[in-house]
Amino acid sequence: MSTLTEVRIAAVGDIHLGEDVRGEYRKRLEGIEERADVLMLAGDLTRHGTLEEGRVVADELRDLPIPVVAVLGNHDYHSDLQHEIAGELRDAGVMVLDDDGVVVECGGTKLGVVGGKGFGGGFAGKCASEFGEREIKDFVAHTRYIAESWKMALKETQADRRVVLSHYSPIKETLEGEPLEIYPFLGSYLLAEAVDTAGADLILHGHAHKGTEKGLTPGGIRVRNVALPVLGKAYAVYCLECGE
Ligand SMILES: [Fe+2]
Ligand SMILES: [Fe+2]
């Protein structure tokens, strides 16, 4: 006989912390262990990607009573200190994804989390293509490389349920509210195509502060834009049912 358990995923992106708000986000995480089994952070944790800001983020998340998985966002890359910021987060106990995956134990359920920052390029029919100047080809090839890495990581991840954690969006529906002109810089359909091929239960992203929370990939996978300004709260909680 099989029964169903529930995995509760707290998620937020774009917390954009700085030294002037030290200690404030931590207060908003109080009691999170009663509401969620894991916390996922969808990038843009800092404002300008400085090491000082990275350390503020690491301190806010240090030794939380539930596992924390994070990806970085474009702001966290701004000072070319992304590796150092990831290092500070890892020292604080945060699992930082870089186009790879981890498996987190959540009350007997193996939860696979795959992802990374992601990148742009636009959406089917309205996207950049690998044509013309070397710089444009490199731009699209970079997103394609990331999408391929996620597809492989999803295929290799042995877990009961799988979540993709990204900063950039895989679909345009969760960008609704943003100016159409900047869609190519907010995400890429190649990310959704990869996840639809490999399969997952949920995709979380941030980056689109003026976007919309809910959408679906063409393959029917739930997508949630968890950018803090979209949620209007410290984090949202999404449930996955898991057979045992
Ligand atoms: Fe942001
Ligand atoms: Fe961003």
Image (tube, rainbow, N blue to C red):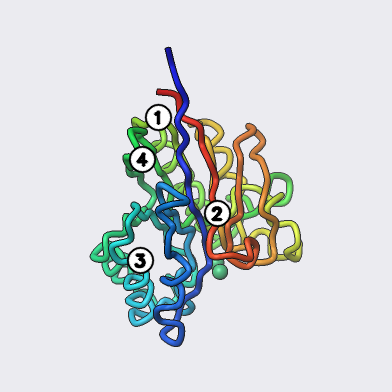
Is 13 on the left or on the right of 218, as rendered?
left
Cβ atoms at labels 2 and 1 below 8 Å apart: no
Label for residue 205?
2
Q: CA distance from mark 3 to mark 4?
A: 18 Å
Residue 65 on image: x %, y % = 32, 56
Q: Which residue is mark 1?
A: 160
Name the image quarter holding the N terminus: top left
Label 3 beta carbon within 8 A of ligand 1:
no
At label 2, the amino acid type is His
At label 1, the amino acid type is Asp
Label 1 beta carbon within 8 A of ligand 2:
no
Ligand 2 image position (quadrant): bottom right
Cβ atoms at labels 1 and 4 below 8 Å apart: no
Q: Earlier in the sequence, mark 2 or mark 1?
A: 1
* Element at label 3: helix
Label for residue 106?
4
Q: Earlier in the sequence, mark 1 or mark 4?
A: 4
At label 3, the amino acid type is Leu
Q: CA distance from mark 4 to mark 2?
A: 21 Å
Q: Which residue is mark 3?
A: 61
Residue at x 73%, y 45% (from the top left corner): 125
Q: Earlier in the sequence, mark 4 or mark 2?
A: 4
Residue 233 on image: x %, y % = 59, 65
Q: Is residue 132 visible?
A: yes
| Mark 2 neighbour class, 10 Å CA radius: few under 14, some 14 to 19, many 20 or more | many
Q: Is residue 156 visible?
A: no
At label 4, the amino acid type is Cys
Q: Earlier in the sequence, mark 3 or mark 4?
A: 3
Residue 3 on image: x %, y % = 45, 21
Residue at x 42%, y 65% (from the top left corner): 30
Q: CA distance from mark 1 to mark 4?
A: 10 Å
